[in-house]
Image: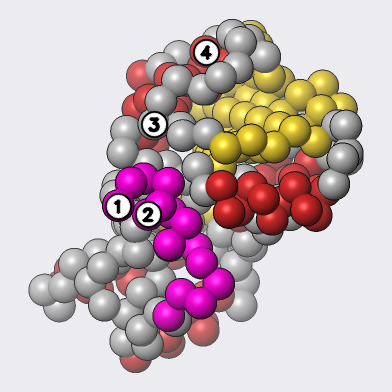
Amino acid sequence: MGVKEFYDDMYRDDKPQQTRLPLYSRILSATLGRFSVNRYELTYQVLPGGDTILDIGCGDDLTLLPLWEKYEKVYGIDISPTRIERMQQQFGDNPDIHLSVGDVNNRLDFADVSFDTIIALAVLEHIFDPYHIIEESHRLLKPGGYCIVHVPNVGWLGNGIRLLAGRLPVTAGCGDDWAAGHLHYFTTNSLKKLFQKFGFEVVKIAYGGPSRRFWGSLLSKTILMAGIKK
């Protein structure tokens, strides 16, 4: 099975439901989840606006539509042809929204300094080489451009409990020890080091959990980070 086929299979409509979460995880999720902010809300709050934006791993969940309110031209790529086809059906012939199939494990088919903003939401954990996508984003961004990523937080409290119980940390919401296609784990510090390695100044760190100023790295399942190209 190739990479494209793998992700088409991962997101097919008839994919079996995830297994039931353990009791402690359900209690934590029910308690903390009431105060959570989803990745789209967090992202839209920090978008600076501009002429062009690229959504890497845009999927088929209409992430692009609100982006259109802040940018003149919106570009979306995804490795799954099936998901791009769904998006094309929804957006039709809109001349300001450009969709294409692309594998971010390789060099992307865009010229240098093409975009004001690049976002990758729930993407880095799925790709083979997260270093490449941040380096590629630096190439594609204009000076002062924003790179915004959203990843699961392996350091959150629920995973600490899993480790104490002798179980593997899981950041995909599964009840078993398989991370549903997640290849990499991130903490706030590891993600920040990744940004800095490729010439980004981190200007915003936000969490989707109940405490977005204090203890966010412990109480939130997710991390949003924004960096500016130096």
Residue sitting farthest toward the bottom: 23
Counting residues from the start of the chain, the first of labels 2 and 3 encountered is: 2
Q: What amino acid is labelled 1 in the image?
A: Met
Q: Are marks 1 and 4 in contact (CB under 8 Å)?
A: no
Counting residues from the start of the chain, the first of labels 1 and 3 encountered is: 1
Q: Residue at x 32, y 33 (%)?
A: 129
The local secondary structure at tag 3 comes to loop
Crowding at mark 1 (Cα within 10 Å: few <14, some 14-19, many 20+) = few
Q: Are marks 1 and 3 in contact (CB under 8 Å)?
A: no
Residue sitting farthest toward the left: 166
Q: What amino acid is labelled 4 in the image?
A: Arg
The local secondary structure at tag 4 comes to helix
Q: Are marks 3 and 4 in contact (CB under 8 Å)?
A: no
Q: Are marks 2 and 1 in contact (CB under 8 Å)?
A: yes
Image vertical order of residue 60 relative to residue 170, above or below: above
Identify the residue position indicated by label 2 in the image.
6
Query: Which label sits on residue 139?
Result: 4
Counting residues from the start of the chain, the first of labels 4 and 2 encountered is: 2
Does the magenta-highlighted stretch encompass residue 3? yes
Question: Where the C terminus falls, by quadrant?
Answer: top right
Identify the residue position indicated by label 1 in the image.
1
Q: Residue at x 56, y 42 (%)?
A: 78
Crowding at mark 3 (Cα within 10 Å: few <14, some 14-19, many 20+) = some
Q: Closer to the camera, 101 or 47?
A: 101
Q: Position of residue 91 (x, y in %)?
A: 83, 48
Q: Nearer the viewer, mark 1 or mark 4?
A: 1
Query: Which label sits on residue 105?
Result: 3
Report, in whole angstroms, how far the alpha carbon at label 1 lies from the one at label 4. Answer: 31 Å
Report, in whole angstroms, how far the alpha carbon at label 2 lies from the one at label 3. Answer: 14 Å
